[in-house]
Amino acid sequence: MASTSGYSIRDSMMMKKRDEFQDLLEERRNSSDLRYAFRCYSPVLYKELSPCTASSLKNLVLRSDQLRFVMSQVCQETGRAVVDIQEEASAILEEMAHNLQLSTVRFFAFTLCKVFKTLFRSICVNEEGIQRLQQVIQEHPVVLLPSHRSYMDFLLMSYIMYTYDVALPVIAAGMDFMGMKFVGEMLRMSGAFFIRRSFGSDKLYWAIFSEYVKTMVKNGFAPVEFFLEGTRSRTSKSLTPKLGLLNIVMDPFFKGEVFDLNLVPVSISYERILEESLYARELLGVPKPKESTSGLIKARKVLSEDYGSIHVYFGEPVSVRSLSQGKIDRSQFNLLPRHIPRRPSEEISSLVNDTAYRLVRAQEENMVLQPWVLLASLLLQSHHQNQVTALDQLTEQAVWLRDLSRQFGAFLHWPDDVPPSEVVSSSLSLHRGLVKISEGRVQLALDQAEQSDPEEPPRAATPEEELLSQAVTVLSCASYRNQALHIFLRPALLASAVLAASSNNKQEVFNSFSFLRNMLSNEFILCPGATVQDFEDACFLLVKTGALQVSQQEVVVTETGHRTLAFLTSVLDPFLQGYQVVCRFLCEEATEALTEKQFVPAVRTFILKLLLAGRLRYTEVLSSDLQKNSLAALMRLGAVQKIKGAEPGTLKVNKVMVNSLEDTLGGKLPTQKAAVARL
Amino acid sequence: MAASGSGGSDRQRVAQQRLRIIAGHLRRPADDDWAVRAAECKAPQSESSAPAEGKKTMPRRRQEIMKWNGWGYNDTKFLFNKKGQTEFTGKRYRLSGMIVPGLQDWFETTFGASVHHKSPATTTLNSSAVPPPNLNEAFVEELKSTGVPFSHDAEDRVFRANGHCLHEIFPLREGKIGRVPDSVVWPNCHNDVVKIVELACKHNVCLIPFGGGTSVSSALECPLEETRSIVSLDTSQMNRILWIDEKNLTAHVEAGIIGQDLERLLNESGYCTGHEPDSMEFSSLGGWVATRASGMKKNVYGNIEDLVVHIKMVTPQGVIEKSCQGPRMSTGPDIHHFILGSEGTLGLVTEVTMKIRPVPAYQKYGSVVFPDFEQGVACLREVARQRCAPASIRLMDNKQFQFGHALKPQGSSIFTSFVDGLKKFYITKFKGFDPNRLCVATLLFEGDREKVLQHEKQVYDIAAKFGGLAAGEDNGQRGYMLTFVIAYLRDLGLDYYVIAESFETSVPWDRVLDVCRNVKARIVRECKERGVQFSPLSTCRVTQTYDAGACVYFYFAFNYRGLSDPIHTFEQVEHAAREEILANGGSLSHHHGVGKLRKQWMRDTVSNVGIGMLKSVKDYLDPNNIFGNRNLY
C-alpha cells in the first residue's frame, strides 16, 4: 500500500525541471538597508483570513471547545480547582505564544542584512517557488517545512518572506532558545512560538499546544512553519521526520475544518555550515553548549569568515487534500464530537507518516549540492584508503563524479562555464580549514583541526586526544559528504547488495538489498514499505549509467561498471562497518546492566580502543549519531529490547540475533529470505 | 384545469386564488379581496362532499398548461428582450410582466455568458422519437373493463418519464427521449387504485406512481433493466378534500392533490396546512409523504411526518392503514415510517389525514444583514438554541444575496431607489460591511399581530448581538421569491449555455460552516479540474434550523461552452459535491429523497443491517417488485 504513495525517483526526475535561482543579497549590496527595513510591506493573505491579533488568538484558544473539554477532564482526574487549571492553561499559553510584530521583523531585516552581507557571498532563492507560494497562500492555509541544518534557518526564512512580500510565518521553536533572555523575546516578536522539548503525558500542555497550532492553521493567521526533522541535523543527513506537529497541522483537514492545506517543503543548503566543527564535537561527545546570549556574542568571530553562499529552494506545494484522496475517509469523525481528543486512526497515522517521508525526500531532492560535497566524498574515500591524491587526479575524479551524480538526478551547483580545475580549487580554498594542499597533493587537514581553539594552550596530546581531534575534521568532512548521500543511497545499497549476494540471481540480490535497506532505515530516509520501488529505482539508475545489466533473472556488473560500483560501495562501507562494530560491542562487551544512557559512552570507548589498535579504519564510526541509529535499528528488529528493570531503560541483548546480524552485514552469512517483500 | 369549460371567469378566479398562495411570499398579505373571498367560499364546505370538479388545477393532459421540457407553466418564462432587459412573461406571478434590469448584467458577468450565444431548446415533441409502447394486452383488456381512464399517447408518456434533475431536462431540450412508461393511468379514487394494483399483480406489470412530477432524485426515471410493461400511475385526479374535522383540526385528503390546490381549498374554509415546500405549486400530498418532504414554514407547522395523522396506502399485499386517529401511539414501530420516504417502492398512498390550522391573522417578512456568513450562522444557531425561530428563517451567503439583488424588478418610484441607496451607504460605508462578504437572513413571521411584533423584536435583538442590522421587509420578500422563480431561471440559463442544479443536506450545527465552505470550494475545484472554462456559481443558504442542526441548500451553475459532454462533467461535479457533503458529516438528503440519483450511498448511510430491514419490508409487501421504480436501494 505504502509503495504506491512512495516517492519515485524516476517519476520526479522525469517530471521536474528545477527553477532558476536569484541572488537576494545582490540588491542589498547596491541599495540602502535602512530603506529596505522600512519598505512598504503588504503581503498577500489567505482569502478567508478573519483578521486577528496575536493576543486575541490566545483567547480563541482558551475559549475553544477542545481546551475546555480537556480542562474539565483534568479537573475531574486531579480534583484541582477549575480556576487553578485555567490559570495554568493561560500561563502555558503565555510561555508558548508568539507575539509577531512587523517592527521587530523590520529590525531583524536590517540587522540580518548586515550580517548576511559579511558572512555570505550570496543568498540564492528560486523566485518561481516564491510565486507559487504566494499563489497558494491566498487559496488555503500553508505550512512551511524547511530543512534544518543551522540556527540561521528560521531567521533566514522570515528574512526571505519579508523581502518577497510573503506573509510572515509563525515558527515552532524549541524551548532552548527561551534560555536566552532578550533574544528569546526578540524571536517571539519575530514570530517564534516555543514548545517544551518533552512534555510526556501532560494532557493539558498537549491540548493547548495542539489547539494553538490548529487555531492558527484554521484561521489562516499566518503560514505555520516548523522543522519536520525536529532538530538541527548535526550530520547534514536528513533526520527521520517527527510526526507530532505534522499530525496536528493536518488534523483540521481531516476534520473538515479547512478545505485544503498546502505543505511546502523548503530546502536550505549552506555551502559552509556555521556550526560545522561544533556539530562534529557534539557528535564526538563534547556536550552541546546551552544556548545563551553570551555564547551568541562569542560567536561573533565567525563574522570574519567566508561562508560561501546559501541556496534556498521553495519546493512544489503539496496539497493535503490530494494526498488524502482515496486514502482517508473523513466521515470517520461524524459520530464523535470533533473536539474530543482521540488517537488518530490507522489510516491517518499511515498517511501522516508517508507524507512526512515524502516531504523530507522532497527537501533532500531540492537541496543544492556544491562541488565541495563531491570533493569531500572523494577525499574521505582516499583518506580511508590512506592515499594522498594529486590535485589534477582529484579534479579528474570530481568531474567523473559530477557526471555520475547528475545522471542520478543531483541538484548540483557546478558552474559549467568555469574550468573544472578552478571549480575544484575555489571549493578547496573555501574549506581550507578541512583540507591541506601541499606540492599539488590534497588530503584532509588532520593536524590543524584543533587550531581553531586558540584559547587552549598547546600541549602534548595523548593518542586518544589526537585521534579525537582528527575525528573532528573527518566528521566535519563527512557532514559535507552526507549532503550527497541521498543521491547515492539507493544505487549504493544495490551495489553493496550485488557485492554481498552469493550469485547474480536477481531475487538473491534483492534479498540482500532488502536486508541492507531494512538495517539502515534508521540511518537514512527510506520510505517505509517502498523496498521494491527503491530496488527498481536503483536498478534503473545503475542500468542508465551503464554500470549494471538487469534482466528478469539476473543482475550483472558490466565491464565499465566497476568504478561506479567501487565508489558506491565505499560510500556505504563506513556505515556497514559501524553497524558491525556496534553489534560486536553488544555481543562482546555489553553487561547485563547496560542502560540506554550508558550505551553511547560505552560503545565510544570500545570504538576508540579498536581505532587505536588499528583494527578499525573508519574514524567516523565515533559519531554518536551512527551509534544511536544502529541501536535504534537493532531495537526495531527486536535484537535488543528495552526492559523496565531496576534501572529504567536497561538494554536486553539477544546475542544470537545480534551476532547473526553482524555476520550478515559482514557478508559472512547469506541473507535470510526477505520476510516482507518479494520481487 | 377548467378544461371542461367552466367559463372564463371561473378560470380567472382559480388562477387568482392560486396566485394568492404564492403571493403570500411575493406580496403583502391580507389584500382586500382575500377577506371577501374567504367568507364567500365558506358555505359549500360544510358537507363532506368533494369541492366542485371544475377547480382542479392539474388536467390529465398536463402538457396543455405545463412545459414538457422545462419548469412550470407554458406561459411563464424569463427572456432577455431586444432592449437588453430581462422580462418575466405571463400573468401568474407578482414578477410576471415586470422588467428585471439587473439580471442580464449579473448573468453575463457571473457566468462569462453572453446573450449572443444561445442554446435554445427544441420546442415541440417529435412523437416519432418516442419508442412505441410495450403493452401487456391482458392487463390493458381488464383495465378497460374497470373504466379507469388511461392513455398510450406519446406526449402523455413522455411527460411522466422524468422529474426535474438537470440530466433529465437537458436531453429533453435536445429532443432526446429515453425509456418512457408504456401507458398512463388516472385513477379517480382509492378503489380505482386497489383495482389497478390487483390487475398489475395479476399480470405482472410494473407500476410507477406519479404525483406532481417535481422529483429531483431521478425517482421517476424508468429503470433501464425493466422489461415488463411500465404503467405510470398519475394521481392528479385524486385531488379532493374528503372531509374537514374542525373539532380535531384535521382534514382527510386524497393524496393526488397538489399543494396549491390543497392550500386554496383549505383557505376557503379558513384553514391551512402550513406545509409549503418550494415545489408546492406542483408537488402532491402523496409525493410529500413518499419523500419525507419538508416545508418552508416547518418551524410553526412541522414537516410532513409531523403533519400526517393517518395514511392509507395500497400495496400488492393489500391496504395498509391504522385503525384510529389517535395523536400518538405506542404500538411498536410506527408503520407510518415504513411509508414516509418509501419513494413509491412499496405502494401508492391514496388518502391522508392531515393536521390543519386556522389561517394566521398576520404575516410579516423581514431581513437582517450580517457582516459575514460566520456571524449569520452563529445568529441562526442562537435563534435555534432559544427555540424562537420564526415560521421561516434562512441565511443566504454573499453570492446568493447578490443573485437575489439582481432579481430586483424595476423600481416603482425614484423614492425607493433613493432609500435603497441610503441603506446601502449606511451598511457598507457607515457600518463598514464588506459588500463582498456580507450576507442576509430572510425572515417570515406568522401569527397574531401582537405576538408577531413581539417575536420579531426578540429575533432582531438576537441578531444585533451578532452584528446583524435589520434590512427591511423588501429584502426578505425577494429572498423567498428567488425560491419560486429559481427553476424558471434555470431554463433561462439553459437557453444560454449555462447549466444549473440545486441540492441539499442536513448537518449538525458545529459542521454547518465547514460543510458550506468545503462543498462550495469542492465545486469550484472540480469544475476547474474538469475543464470548465469559466468559474462556476457556487452558493448556498442555510434554509432550515433545528435543535441539533440545520438544512443547507446549494445552488451551482456554470457556463458549459467548450465542454464536449457537459452533462457528464456536471454529473461528476455533482457526485463530488455529494461525496464532500458526506465526508463533512452532512446527510444524504434532508428532503429531496434518494431516488436513483443517490442510491449508491444508501448502504453507507443506513448500514448493511438497515438495508436488510428495508429490503425485508419490500420483500413482504411487494415480492414481485410491482412497484418497480427501483428507488432507494
Image (spheres, helix red, strand yellow):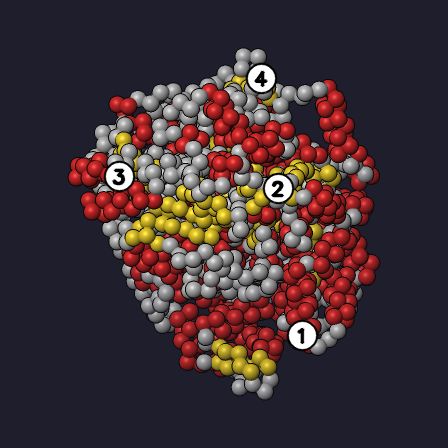
| Marks 1, 2 in one chain | no
Q: CA distance from mark 1 to mark 3?
A: 65 Å
Q: Does label 4 or label 2 sit earlier along the sequence?
A: 4
Looking at the picture, does residue A214 appear above or below residue A461?
A: above
| Marks 2, 3 in one chain | yes
Looking at the picture, does residue A247 appear above or below residue B468?
A: below
- The answer to whether mark 1 and mark 4 are in CB contact below 8 A is no
Question: Which label sits on residue B360?
Answer: 2
Q: Residues within 10 Å of mark 3 (few under 14, many from 20)?
A: many
Residue depicted at x 64% and y 29%: B32
Q: Residue furthest left?
A: B138
Quickly name the residue at label 3.
B230
Q: Residues within 10 Å of mark 1 (few under 14, many from 20)?
A: few
Q: CA distance from mark 4 to mark 2?
A: 38 Å
Q: Does label 3 or label 4 sit earlier along the sequence?
A: 4
Q: CA distance from mark 3 to mark 4?
A: 45 Å
Q: Residues within 10 Å of mark 2 (few under 14, many from 20)?
A: some
Quickly name the residue at label 4.
B85
Q: Chain of mark 2?
A: B
Is A510 displayed left or right of A410 in the figure? left
Q: Chain of mark 3?
A: B
Question: Which label sits on residue A76?
Answer: 1
Q: Amino acid at mark 3?
A: Ile
Residue depicted at x 72% and y 23%: B417
Residue B536 screen position, x and y as percent: 53, 32
> Which dot, 1 or 3, sits closer to the camera?
3
Q: Amino acid at mark 1?
A: Gln
- Give the structural element (helix, strand or loop) at label 2: loop
Q: Amino acid at mark 2?
A: Pro
Q: CA distance from mark 1 to mark 4?
A: 68 Å
Q: Amino acid at mark 4?
A: Gln
Q: Which of the 4 image quarters holds residue A593?
A: bottom right
